[in-house]
């Protein structure tokens, strides 16, 4: 873990600033910054049934009719956090999914025109190597009406590097995944968004 001076004379830890996590991670409809149960439920009940996403998903995952959706399959409450979703077939994990949601000051309706990448946090790199099955990033807009998805084989080769986020005044370790490598799904997708993503 490294430190950075934000110009105020205070040293900020990359992952250690609870106030920043609370300010930028909390949604109005969440109990706390880590409560992503609503986002996971929307993925299970709506996104996973999206026919266009199903076509993309099935390029990597062949589960037939026998599959089970498990939220937080490896978590130990208050001790250990892991992937958000596991899809299991005949008792074996065939896919893992990390669900994220944009905040109210970032992507709400149309994807912001100045965004160039989807950021995958370095602390989650373990998900790419710990499990021998497909892994998807799913990033919702704030309204939970659209989402971007990409599978690990597309981005795992991208180096993880430090990036300073000016709005949050915080540095984090991330992979920067080009938007053109990602797919967009959902409601009211604009022509601009169709051109920006796959």
Image (spheres, rainbow, N blue to C red):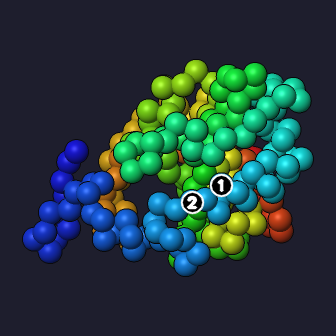
Q: Position of residue 64 (x, y in %)?
A: 87, 26
Tell me the residue that label 2 is attached to.
Answer: 36
Tell me the residue that label 1 is attached to.
Answer: 40
Are circles 2 and 1 on residues that touch, CB within 8 Å?
A: yes
Q: Is residue 42 above or below residue 52?
A: below
Say what secondary structure mark 2 lies in.
loop
Q: Is residue 177 above or below residue 14?
A: above
- Residue nearest the viewer, comparing 137 with 97: 97
Residue 5 visible to the viewer: yes
Q: Is residue 72 left or right of residue 143?
A: left
Q: Position of residue 29 (x, y in %)?
A: 59, 75
At horizontal 64% and vertical 49% (from top left) the residue drawn is 138
Quarter of the image holding residue 153?
A: top right
Q: Residues within 10 Å of mark 2 (few under 14, many from 20)?
A: some
At horizontal 75% and vertical 66% (from top left) the residue drawn is 145
Say what secondary structure mark 1 lies in.
helix
Q: Position of residue 35 (x, y in %)?
A: 52, 62
Q: Is residue 95 left or right of residue 10?
A: right
């Amino acid at each position: 873990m490294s430190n950075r001076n934000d110009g105020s004379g205070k040293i900020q830890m990359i992952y250690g600033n609870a106030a920043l996590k609370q300010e930028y991670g909390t949604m109005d409809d969440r109990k706390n910054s880590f409560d992503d149960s609503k986002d996971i439920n929307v993925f299970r009940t709506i996104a996973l049934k999206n026919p266009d996403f199903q076509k993309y998903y099935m390029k990597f995952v062949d589960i037939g009719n026998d599959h089970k959706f498990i939220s937080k399959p490896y978590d130990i409450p208050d001790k250990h956090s892991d992937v958000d979703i596991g899809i299991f077939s005949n008792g074996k994990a065939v896919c893992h999914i990390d669900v994220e949601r944009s905040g109210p000051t970032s992507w709400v309706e149309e994807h912001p025109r100045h965004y160039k990448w989807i950021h995958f946090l370095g602390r989650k790199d373990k998900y790419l190597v710990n499990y021998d099955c497909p892994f998807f990033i799913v990033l919702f807009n704030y309204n939970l009406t659209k989402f971007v998805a990409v599978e690990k084989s597309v981005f795992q080769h991208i180096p993880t590097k430090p990036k300073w986020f000016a709005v949050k005044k915080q540095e984090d370790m991330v992979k920067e995944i080009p938007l053109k490598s990602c797919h967009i799904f959902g409601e009211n997708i604009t022509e601009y968004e169709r051109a920006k993503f796959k």
